[in-house]
Amino acid sequence: MTTPTATTQQSSPDGPAGRTGPARSGAGLLRRLWAPLSVLVGALLWWPVGFLGLESWLHLPLDVFEGDVLFLGATAAAASVSLVVRSPWPRFAIVVLFSGLGWLLDGPATDTYPHERAVLAALLGGGALLGIVLGARGAKGALAAATVLAVVAGFSPTTWPRGLALALALALPFAVATWQRVAPTVLSLVRLVVTWLVFALLARALSYGWDLVRPGSGGVPVSDQARTVAEASWDFVRTQWWTYSEALLTSSTRWFAVAGVLAVVIVVLRAGRGAAHRRSAPSTH
């Protein structure tokens, strides 16, 4: 049984329900709008994240001598789409549509080298599938999304888009950080940097191995070419991991600075939001 006073307080527009109602409805509206908007954002991200600065707009490096760039770009592009677009079928449709369009624009009509089209299709399709799987893991929260961005920053063969992805990845942990959880936040930053370095090293190793591909050299089987790439890539990882990682850290200082600025912005926005919430909260006497 409720008293008239309690009933009046619950239904009053000045009570807690009256204050939180518009906020909740606004959040619900944003969630409903984001579903179709995310599809547009994903479509706009696909080509720049994977191939900006490498080819003309919407074109792909469908050349067997650039197979490493094709695979890495397709993986990074699909991961960015999968991160933004949460619904499975729309994200799959975006990746397939733009991959197919790129193939129509640049795909070879005939095999200049043995199995050329099959190899290119496998690289493009395999990279797209791997990117979708990796990007889908970002739906678990801010730290998971930051991990996906670190992978994209490591794999993408582009220039500034991968640096921006790295900066966003290092800034995102501050969206959930608190003064009581300083150590976990620092550990998250270290883990993200290591993730980025590992995937960047793997990408560079693949490119190093791919430089040894000679598709027209006396009919060497594709399996032997793949073995050559794998062995050379492993040699690079084994012998150059420290030198390459050190050079990568040194050349990315400006993106670390951008990450710091973004982190400050996130902290300020969170502080402002918390202050506004405290002012609008009902006072208890």
Image: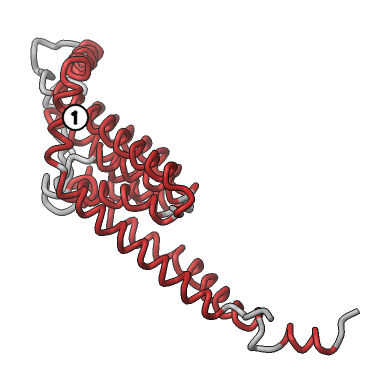
Residue 174: which quarter of the image? bottom left
Q: Tell whether 91 sits left or right of 161.
A: right
Q: Is residue 58 above or below residue 122?
A: below
Q: Tell whether 111 sits left or right of 274.
A: left
Q: Give the percent coordinates (x, y) of residue 158.
A: 16, 44
Q: Is residue 57 visible?
A: yes
Q: Is residue 53 above or below residue 263?
A: above
The residue located at (72%, 86%) in the rendering is 11
Q: Is residue 50 above or below residue 16?
A: above
Q: Nearer the viewer, residue 244 or 229?
A: 244
Q: Give the percent coordinates (x, y) of residue 102.
A: 22, 46
Q: Tell whether 39 sits left or right of 249.
A: right
In the picture of the structure, the residue carrying the numbered disc 1 is 245
Q: Amino acid at mark 1?
A: Ser
Q: Nearer the viewer, residue 210 or 225?
A: 210
Residue 268: which quarter of the image? bottom left
Q: Nearer the viewer, residue 151 or 57?
A: 151
Residue 185: which quarter of the image? top left
The residue located at (36%, 36%) in the rendering is 191
**Label 1 crowding class (10 Å Cα cut-off): few <14, some 14-19, many 20+?**
some
